[in-house]
Amino acid sequence: MIFASTKNKEIKMSYGEAIFQGLAEDGSLFHPVEKIDLKDLYYSFSSKDSFLKMASLITANLLKAEISTEEAFLICERAFTFEPKLKQLDEMFSVLELFHGPSAAFKDFGASFLASSMESFLKNRSSKAVILTATSGDTGSAVARAFYEKENIDVVILYPSNRVSPLQEKQLTTLGKNIHALEVLGSFDDCQRLVKEAFTDQALRKNYHLTSANSINVGRLIPQSFYYIWAWVHEREKRNNGELYFCVPSGNFGNLTAGLLANRWGMDLGGFIIATNRNKVVPEYLQTGEYHPRKSVQTPSNAMDVGAPSNFERMIQLYENHSAMKENLSAYFFDDETTLSEIKKYKEKYQYTICPHTAVGCLAAEAMLKETSTKAKVITLSTAHPGKFLEIVKEATEEEVDLPECLKVLINKEKFSVKMKPTLDDLRKKLKMIFQ
Ligand SMILES: *Cc1c(COP(=O)(O)O)cnc(C)c1O
């Protein structure tokens, strides 16, 4: 599979190179350049096929120029020890639960696949790698879990101080060993900027064999397309009329972009619904045609608090122009209060507890269905287990939330992080300290 920089088609790389490179050398993101057609494969799947089987066959197909079918199956087998689940709420709504992995969030799919791919590609090189990643909460914990105790790979996580939930922080800061947490006195945008700056600093990058693992890495992006297909296969068999839509709670837009790729490669669909919180630069763009990235604001769906979504440059690549994008995508944003009351509403209406991110998605799904006259079915991606956001969910529902097992064990563990200023200079010092 060949990827090129979104800004310069001459800068090209294979999958095996691009996963270690992270960003292209011109500072932009890698994006698939070949015309890929998986339609026949997608249509050959039935709901009797496991998620692992679908993922393995898609991987083998996408990476056939680089690895054997056996290797592709191995990568998926190591990565996907968990599955998505579809929960039908009523005739028009389903929720795609993506939180049954080791960190109870959808980012487990991408992180596990990336870690497993890196393991395969590193096997024959006696080289080390340092994963440098910025997180607004969930990326970091998924990455930490996916890479924990992997040989020849260290992970350095930058997260914004006081902007992740206490439990998310524990997920980042209690593993130890090859997982190092840096607590940045700034916002998620600062963390993301620092990662970008570090990657464009050639000396720093070479010195530490820096590589990325956040949503910009194609090794995270590609596998996120698999669960769209899995859900689409299940839904396609059930439905006899009406168009199918996916609704995606979005922050950095990696999850949505993966869905757009699946769509491009042959998954027929009515379209996508974008759901954001008050960080609404993409809904604004769709409405006005003008893109104004800005500082993020804090909301209860904090993993979506992104003011300058990286994947926007990929989204732009996928459409000829603004109106083509508008045909495929509709977008909605919601304020904090509405989000909290949606959590309560779902609890009362369906006896089903959702996390604040998923709540933003459910709101958008309802808003879209209200506007459309055609018969439609919406699958909303449920991006995290509600127990990851105990305080917020409790505030909304006035009831206790059950924690998933993987989080329960963290409560009594001790946090270990190193605080740092949001500057490249301080990042340099901290890396030296960790790896001296
Ligand atoms: C990361 C995350 C999102 C946003 O996903 P993007 O790919 O960044 O758009 C939504 N919900 C949760 C729980 C997340 O962790």
Image (cartoon, rainbow, N blue to C red):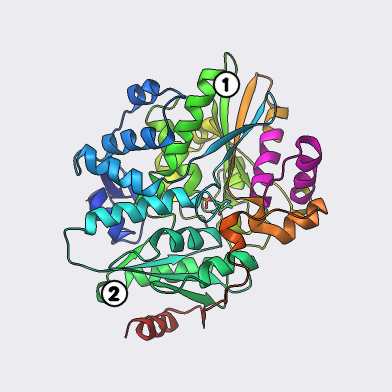
Query: Where residue 388 sits in the image (x, y, percent)?
Result: 63, 57
User: Looking at the rendering, which quadrant does residue 90 occupy?
Assistant: top right
Question: Which residue occupies the foreground of this view, 351 or 333?
Answer: 351
Question: Helix, strand, or loop for circle 2?
Answer: helix
| Residue 202 drawn at (x, y percent) | 27, 73
Tag 1: amino acid: Glu
Please give left or right for residue 400 compared with residue 365 in the image.
Answer: right
Camera-side residue of 347 and 313: 347
Left or right? Give the position of 259 relative to 361.
Answer: left
Q: Is residue 358 magenta?
A: yes
Disc 1/disc 2 C-alpha distance (Å): 49 Å
At 68% across and 39% down in the image, what residue appears?
A: 362
> Total label count?
2
Q: Amino acid at mark 2?
A: Tyr
Q: Is residue 175 above or below residue 114?
A: below
Residue at the image position 57 percent from the left and 77 percent from the top: 414
